[in-house]
Image (spheres, grey):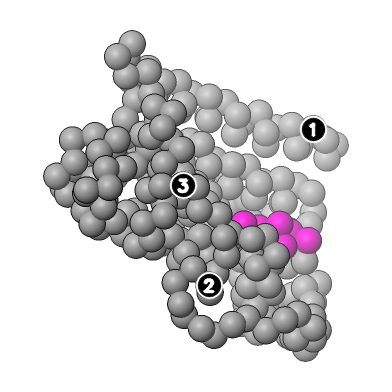
Amino acid sequence: MGADCRYQTVIQDIAKKMGAGMADFAALSTPEKPVAEVNTLDDYDLYCHYVAGLVGEGLSGIFAVSGKEREWIADQLTLSNSMGLLLQKTNIFRDIKEDVDEGRGFWPRAIWSKHGFNSMAELLDPAREKEALFASSEMVLDALRHAVDALDYLTLLRTQSVFNFVAIPAVMAIATLERCFMNPDILKKNVKIRRGEAIRVSHQTHNLLTMLTSSSSTERSTPETSRTSSESMPRRSTRRLHGTTLIS
């Protein structure tokens, strides 16, 4: 079987699983509520698995069949799924204003209902900002459940291009969670980070991970070369004023 056929096999398998899973969630919709709400945290994890965790699993399969990563990376389903969930949950958390305005609601009811809200639309009520931020803090903590697995996954990658492909969005996600944590702006607009800042942070993350895994691969750049590249960039401000440390 040629490489192209192996890629097709991985993609077909993931697309089949994703289609079946999303069909299950679509079946929960009604004419009154065309976008079904997510109720429990288990439902939330399952939904994010179908839309992003499976993508993580598929990418691991593609990395393996391409020969860029070792074959057993395709078997790291838990870590691959966690990487996808970290990214997806960050997007869902950050996009609350846009989603509510367009009639969508992906924050799980299990989180926002305990703070006295009857619908996600109520989270945008300026008079209830404090309670909404308490709910948002739980969303951040839930997303960070997957951060350790995501970082563990990065330590397994041996090819620089694959590492960069995975590390940059992961670091952007963690930086976004930091920027948006207890930040009332997320209830008013879409809060984003600058890609340049994320790349700079990813270099710092790469330095740390390379030092931790320097004996596992010769294909990734060494701590010395990574340190040189990061030192050529402007130093990150150590000030902790809200909104200045990480990204917009």
Give the mark, 2 or 3, whose residue is nearer the N terminus: 3
Q: Which residues are magenta?
A: 161-170
Residue 76's disc is none
In the rendered image, the quadrant that contains the C terminus is bottom right
User: Which of these two is toward me, 123 or 19?
Assistant: 123
User: Which secondary structure, mark 3?
Assistant: loop
Looking at the image, which residue sits at the far right? Answer: 2
Quadrant where the image shows the N terminus: top right
Q: How far apart in space, not on screen, are marks 2 and 3 (Cα)? A: 17 Å
Q: Is residue 146 above or below residue 237?
A: above
Residue at the spot of label 2: 244
- Which residue in the protein does label 1 denote? 5
Disc 1 marks a residue whose amino acid type is Cys
Q: Judge left or right: residue 67 versus residue 130.
A: right
Amino acid under disc 3? Lys
Q: What residue sits 72% from the left and 81% below the top? A: 234
Whole-number angstrom distance, CA of label 1 to CA of label 3: 44 Å
